Amino acid sequence: MSQGPFFSIVVPACNVGAYIGECLRSLQAQTHPEFEALIVCEESRDGTRDIINAMISGDARFQLIDQPRTGSASASRNYGIRNAQGCYLLFVDGDDWIEPDSLAHFRQALAASGEVDILLADARYYLDRGDGPQLLREWHHQVPLQQVLTGPEMLAKQLQGEFGTATWRRIYRREFLQSQQLYQVIGRRHQDDEWAYRVFLAAARTWAIDFCYYNYRKRPDSVTTTANLETFRDYTDNLISFFRYWRENRNHIPVPVQPLLASWFIGQMFRFFIPHFCRLYQRSFRYQEFARMMQDEAGGYQVYRELAKMASRRSLRVLRPVLALARRRRLFPLAEFLYGRLWWYLIMARKRLRTPRQ
């Protein structure tokens, strides 16, 4: 274990001048004193750096690190993984905030669990349209609580329910991330989707607690919520990365996890066809990205077929002929209709019937 502070809090900050104050105040209010905070500020146009500098002045627990603009939080998080001194890492985005007793809860949980690689905790989801955050829901991990599970076992439990990939939904042992070289792809949006499964597959010991510590603010102008071509390309790149990972590492993925992981990633392919994304992105662009994924020489269609055959969800296995159609440009509109206009609505209707009325 490190001889430094017990916790390191890594805060990526870029153009969050309206929110960074609330974030930093939540860190300064922590009831557990043993922490350092690395505030990694990328080039901003709204005075974010000046606000940070004024707020942390004189507090030795806080460091301000300047970084060039990269387009995502990955570089800032990687800086924290490489340079933090704490035994455990928390990642808090600059427009979010955490509860004042978060570190105290985590220290107590880690005393009970022993040295784990990943500690899972819960979060609240707020929508902010400019008039202040409005609570929409709480995110709770649907996994066994206060029970040591291997990383693959914990991943399987999440994939059977709702797998939230956000980096900040967990606390990580720093030496584990460093020793396994678990860094995020720099500049890629939604990089959590590509990172989370790799982290769990590498972890030896995990532990979950029922404590809402994180407050996530969804705002319409953030990098991850703004629809643009770069964001969609990053979705495609995440799928390509997984296909390549599968091809190289399938034999090292525990057999019970394989069909669950296959289903989850096939589900990410909805973005090429479902109505919401059809409205946001032109068909020609979606076909271009779909073809780029399927033609990737290190993965592509052959890996997709392998995944589809073993998917744990039967409703995904039956879509193989539809995806085969989509590989041809002139048949892509037919696949879009079958997948997004027919299959999708049938699945949604079935889901509504299964959901109990309040």
Image (cartoon, grey):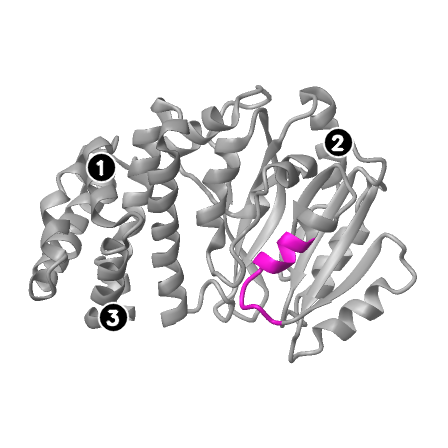
Residue 163, by quadrant, is top left
Q: Which residue is mark 3?
A: 285
Cα separation, mark 2 vs mark 1, equals 43 Å
Q: Is residue 75 magenta?
A: yes
Q: Is residue 51 above or below residue 45?
A: above
Q: Amino acid at mark 2?
A: Arg
Closest to the camera, between mark 1 and mark 3, is 1
Residue in the image at 51% along x and 23% along y: 144
Is 62 included in the stretch rendered in magenta?
Answer: no
Residue at image point 92% right, 61% down = 58
Other-residue count near label 3 (Cα within 10 Å), few / some / many at <14 / 14–19 / ≥20: some
Q: Are marks 1 and 3 in contact (CB under 8 Å)?
A: no
**Dot 1: few (<14), some (14–19), or many (≥20) neighbours within 10 Å?**
few
Say few, some or many: other residues with alpha carbon within 10 Å of mark 2 (under 14 / 14 to 19 / 20 or more).
some
Position of residue 27 relative to residue 131, above or below, is above
- Residue 354: image location, x then y, percent: 24, 35
For label 2, the SS is helix
Q: Amino acid at mark 1?
A: Glu
Residue 38 horizontal side relative to residue 192, left or right: right
**Magenta range:** 69-79
| Residue linked to disc 1 | 306
Name the residue carrying label 2: 107
- Examine the rendered structure and indicate whether residue 270 appears above or below residue 58: above
Residue at the (68%, 72%) spot, across then down: 17
Q: Helix or strand or loop: what does disc 1 sit on?
A: helix
